[in-house]
Image (spheres, grey):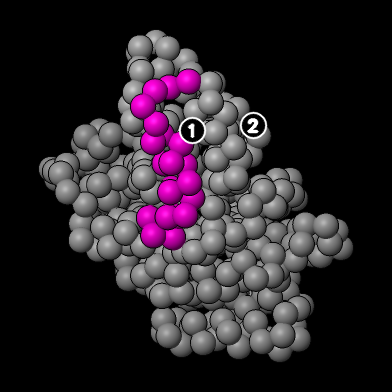
Amino acid sequence: MFSFFKKKPPPTAAASSVAASTPPGPSGATAATGTGSLIGQALLAPIDIAVANEVAPERQKWLDKLKSGLGKTASSISRVFGGARIDEALYEALEDALLMADTGVAATGYLLQELRRKAKDAGVTHPVALKNMLVASLTELLAPLEKTLVIGQHKPTVIMVTGVNGAGKTTSIGKLTQHLCSHGASVLLAAADTFRAAAREQLSVWAERTTVEIISQQGGDPAAVSFDAVSAGKARGKDVVLVDTAGRLPTQLHLMEELKKIKRVVQKADASAPHEVLLVIDGNTGQNALTQVQAFDDALGLTGLIVTKLDGTAKGGVLAAIARARPIPVYFIGVGEKLEDLETFNAREFAQALLS
């Protein structure tokens, strides 16, 4: 499993030498690649980072689940390259397959344009070689979404999590809590989803399973719960405060205003917070996911995404649409209900799973 938990080190020469030896990711930060991210105090001493030639068994097991989840889409796209030559009929069939995979018009047009250009420049004539070029082009398109979640620059790091009902928001918070705790972070949960029945109880179950503290009020005001949680997180020296907000559709303008209120009130408890605003999107919703990203980003200023339910009917291509229209980092993707089914996003891995 790739690590994503980092604590900001003091500016020592040793830390600088490590940072200098680590290749930057697509967004300037250390990418979640085969070597993983550096954790906590490991940054305080110079170390040699070996480049892994093989994927760790845990990661490979998860990748196999991702490939299985995206199998239907991968199969339909792969059939396009089953012929003996590259012609206009192939490009037309590929366009249809990408659109059916929820890639969207803009991203599909971009990928086809890049593919035609690269194939012409390289003199490619066989469909298999063209497919490999498509994997490379999709990886390049998705690369800006690959970014590591950084914890430790603020204490506590306040993470506000939102999303529409049914997207898997509260479950994703539970999984994220488990990951943070497994990397040594102390977490406090805020049950600010006071609109949905049983939401507070659901988050309490996750708090019990991950043995973390929770701030909740039955029927309380969401903004007030959030304020209390951030204040408690500061007083108790917590590393992370995760705020679970109520799910709502972006068309519910009065509820979107409530989200803005929560953000404003959190800033009263900590002027620099929230440090991350994450949107959980359901991978099964297709282009609706892009609509949600745009609406929530306009309202709150999103810093990252969690994509869930890529384990069956999800087509997966919507990430290409997001990368083309609103390239907000995808911190995690989920392929199941278990705690270990939430993993860091890697552009090339995802492109290979979608097109294998």
Res 7 → quadrant:
bottom left
What stretch of residues is rendered in magenta? 67-87
Q: Which residue is mark 2?
A: 106
Task: Please state which of the two labelled residues, at mark 2 or mark 1, is closer to the viewer.
Answer: 2
- With 24 as the anchor, is 309 left or right in this view? right
Image coords of residue 78 (percent x, y): 41, 41
Look at label 1 and name its amino acid.
Leu
Q: Image point 62% across, 66% down: which residue?
A: 167
- The C terminus sits in image quarter: top left
Q: Which residue is mark 1?
A: 141
Look at label 2 and name its amino acid.
Ala
Q: Is residue 241 visible to us here?
A: no
Residues under labels 2 and 1: Cα distance? 12 Å
Query: Disc 2 on helix, strand or loop?
Result: helix
How many residues crowd around disc 2 within 10 Å: few (fewer than 14), some, or many (20 or more)? some
**As drawn, 270 above or below 233:** above
How many residues crowd around disc 1 within 10 Å: few (fewer than 14), some, or many (20 or more)? many
Magenta highlight on residue 164: no
